[in-house]
Image: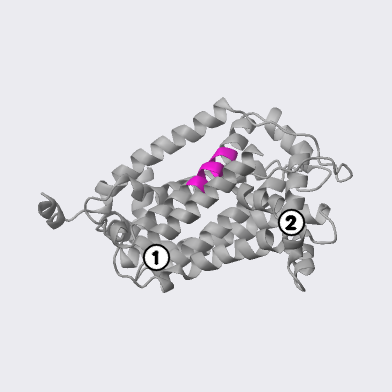
């Protein structure tokens, strides 16, 4: 039944052959080792974060009157709520580590060199996006820890002359950390950053496909 | 042996995907095990009037947070803007500055020293921040 359905679409779209030719049968260098897996692991963790994040979106309400209570509900009352939130939390923490190890591997193997300079550049953007995910996500539970740690963060650009105060205001959506900051961080966390990730990841993956994985040492 | 290996065409599937699958399985098991062993809690609701609360960022923001604490407030701009900005710019332009075609770490002493220094300092400030 499912196979027939795939057949119907494949006859028109031909994706099976494309997938085989472009992904599965793509040559990789011989003697590739396990350190080459950190990038794939990062992507896997991103997918886990997307799935658990969407699951929490069904219940979380991003307003200062509801954020804390809905997180409390997800954590203690919603069936499977706690493991879903915990998987989101741990995936995020391990993803930061995986990104760091992936960057170290690419650096040590000199894989960023000509012609792969822009694989590295898109990767640095993705690194920044990952940190921004962590920073914006930390505020969403709207507890004391979230509020006061984020306050330190949003006030950091303020020390920059001229543009600093404006940048801080832009981050907070006003003169103080409050309702507008929460809305803003929520929108950035669940809409802006995922879209940016898809754009930069498409470039990152496309260049890996075009230029191949660099040879091991 | 190595020569023989080089001639053999290695494909993403099944050669590399198999390794990826093993790594993926280990990571998924680790994440689920951590999630079940250490369930989430909630703190106290945010109270903007209670400024006595000691802020503490996630571990991966500990290094700049620690530097912010140890720098005098007149030099606050160094840990808040200058250092993070320089790190990002340096990372971004690095492939264009390093034109040495060698890929073996043994033949890239300068690049390796830069990385070693960066990694050691990052880990040091992170550990100092967490233990402070």
Q: Position of residue A39 (x, y in %)?
A: 41, 52
At 64% across and 65% down in the image, what residue appears? B82
Q: Using the image as rendered, state which of residue B67 and residue B8 is in the foreground.
A: B67
Image quadrant holding the C terminus of chain B, namely top right
Question: For the residues marked 2 and 1, what is the alpha-carbon distance in whole angstroms?
Answer: 46 Å
Q: Of the numbered discs in the image, which one, if any, rests on residue A206?
A: 1
- Other-residue count near label 2 (Cα within 10 Å), few / some / many at <14 / 14–19 / ≥20: few
Kindly identify which residue carries mark 2. Answer: B72
Q: Does residue A13 appear anywhere in the picture?
A: no
A56 vs B113: above or below: above
Report the magenta stretch's main SS.
helix
Q: Position of residue B96 (x, y in %)?
A: 42, 73
Q: Secondary structure at mark 1?
A: helix
Q: Using the image as rendered, state which of residue A115 and residue B103 is in the foreground.
A: B103
Q: The magenta stretch spans which residues?
A: A89-97
Query: Does A96 appear in magenta?
Result: yes
At 31% across and 43% down in the image, what residue appears? B19
Q: Secondary structure at mark 2?
A: loop
- State which chain disc 1 sits on: A
Q: Does residue B38 appear anywhere in the picture?
A: yes
């Amino acid at each position: 039944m499912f196979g027939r359905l795939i057949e119907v679409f494949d006859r028109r779209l031909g994706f099976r052959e494309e997938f085989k030719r472009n992904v599965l049968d793509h040559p990789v260098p011989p003697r590739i080792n396990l350190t080459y897996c950190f990038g794939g692991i990062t992507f896997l963790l991103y997918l886990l974060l997307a799935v658990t994040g969407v699951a929490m979106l069904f219940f979380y309400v991003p307003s200062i009157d509801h954020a804390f209570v809905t997180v409390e509900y997800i954590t203690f009352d919603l069936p499977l709520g706690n493991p879903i939130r915990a998987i989101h939390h741990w995936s995020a923490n391990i993803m930061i580590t995986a990104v760091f190890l992936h960057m170290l591997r690419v650096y040590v193997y000199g894989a960023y060199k000509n012609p792969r300079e822009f694989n590295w550049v898109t990767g640095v953007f993705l690194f920044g996006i990952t940190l921004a995910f962590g920073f914006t996500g930390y505020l969403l539970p709207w507890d004391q820890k979230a509020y006061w740690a984020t306050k330190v963060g949003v006030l950091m650009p303020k020390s920059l002359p001229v543009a600093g105060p404006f940048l801080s205001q832009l981050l907070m959506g006003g003169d103080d950390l409050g309702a507008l900051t929460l809305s803003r961080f929520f929108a950035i966390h669940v809409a802006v950053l995922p879209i940016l990730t898809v754009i930069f990841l498409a470039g990152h993956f496309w260049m890996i496909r075009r230029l191949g994985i660099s040879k091991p040492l | 042996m190595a020569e023989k290996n080089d001639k053999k065409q290695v494909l993403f599937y099944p050669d590399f995907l198999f390794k990826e699958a093993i790594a993926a399985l280990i990571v998924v098991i680790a994440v689920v095990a951590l999630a079940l062993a250490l369930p989430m809690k909630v703190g106290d609701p945010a109270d903007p009037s209670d400024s006595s609360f000691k802020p503490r960022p996630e571990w991966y923001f500990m290094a700049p947070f620690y530097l912010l604490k140890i720098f005098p407030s007149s030099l606050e701009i160094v840990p808040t803007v200058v250092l993070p900005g320089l790190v990002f710019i340096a990372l971004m332009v690095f492939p264009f500055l390093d034109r040495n075609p060698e890929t073996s770490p043994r033949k890239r002493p300068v690049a390796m020293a830069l990385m070693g220094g960066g990694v050691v300092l990052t880990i040091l400030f992170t550990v100092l921040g967490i233990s402070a």
